[in-house]
Amino acid sequence: MEELVYLNGRLLPRAQARISPLDHGFLYGYGLFETMRAYKGHIFRLNAHIERLLAAAKLLGFASKLSAAMLKQACVEVLEANQLEEASVRLAVSAGEGEPRPDPATCQEPTVFIVARTYVPPSPEAYERGFSAVMASLRRDSQSPLSYLKSANFLLSLLARQEARGAGADEALLLNERGHVAEGSLSNIFLGKGGRLFTPDQESGILPGITRQVVLELAHSLGVAVKEDKLGPEALLSADEAFLTNSLIEVMPLTQIGGKAIGSGRPGPLTVSFMAAYKELVARETGIAC
């Protein structure tokens, strides 16, 4: 079946989708995106993703031209049109076409583009082994608003990903300009120590991840104390265990950094409990059995 995408109010074959070369998302990275995961045709935490995108769009100045209801419906339509059940759904918005100069006031209507693809999660063996990471040479700027937005200006994360790939690692971890742990190039990070969870706070220059928020909710229901704080790099290797989160990989054990084991070098008990609790929550909220 030919792949269908959503572009500015229409479903059409991907090969026919055209975005203006004067779109400010293309010219200046003046846009936002969300990556979501669908289970059995149900997008998990769709409302939360749309709310985050609209809050960011308000900061960028074009939220008033977007409709939450329209964005939600469009995401569902793309999923259904492609007859997908286990899928990743990527929603991208930009300020739209404007003059070829950095002046947002010349943009009239936002561009909205959505694509959905079959998603195959990491293997069970990957979750049993856990991800490896390296410390990126790049730094997050905790003072920059870009660190708190899922913007189309994703170059820092892409460069960090290249470092990880070059080192044969699964993920790259970034410190901020003050030397505190911020996040992974595509993930938030949690550390387990003495039966408690620790995670970088918002002021460390992190994206407020949707899955990160789910873990914070689960910690309360599981009776696990969690502290959002400023963490030095030494906290990583002194942790008993660690895990990464994002919407696609869910809760992924982090077992090595720079070739050195975290704790036992295997997924720890807190990690395993959150992996299971996350899947149970997905099953409840999407009405399916995972």
Image (cartoon, grey):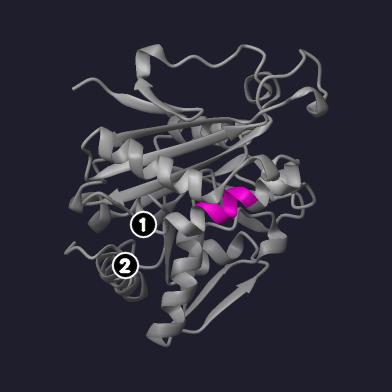
Left or right for 154, reference 265? right
Q: Nearer the viewer, residue 6 or 210?
A: 6
Q: Write down the residue under mark 2.
A: 285
The quarter of the rendered structure image containing the N terminus is top left
Cβ–Cβ under 8 Å for marks 2 and 1: yes
Residue positioned 53% across, 57% down in the render: 209
Q: Is residue 247 above or below residue 65?
A: below
Instruction: Give the overall secondary structure of the magenta segment.
Output: helix
Residue found at x 36% / y 19%: 14
- The answer, for residue 237, to whether it is visible in the render is yes
Question: Is residue 170 visible to the viewer in this orientation of the structure?
Answer: no
Residue 200 vertical placement versus 120 (above, below)? below
For residue 44, which numbered disc appears in the image? 1
Q: Which residues are magenta?
A: 50-54
**Label 2 or label 1, whichever comes before in sequence order:** 1
Q: Position of residue 204 (x, y in %)?
A: 69, 59
Residue drawn at the location 48% of the way across and 38% of the way down: 91
User: Which is nearer the eye, 195 or 258?
Assistant: 195
Residue sitting nearer the eye, 255 or 67: 67
Up-down relation of residue 128 to residue 222 (above or below): above
Rounded to the nearest whole Å, what is the CA distance between mark 2 and mark 1?
Answer: 7 Å
User: Which of the image's four quarters has the C terminus?
Assistant: bottom left
Horizontally, residue 21 falls left or right of residue 268, namely: right
Helix, strand or loop at mark 1: loop
Q: Splitting the image into 4 quarters, where does residue 81 fall?
A: top left
Element type where label 2 sits in the image = helix
Does 42 sit left or right of 182 as displayed? Answer: left
Name the spot of residue 243 as percent of width and height, x first.
42, 61
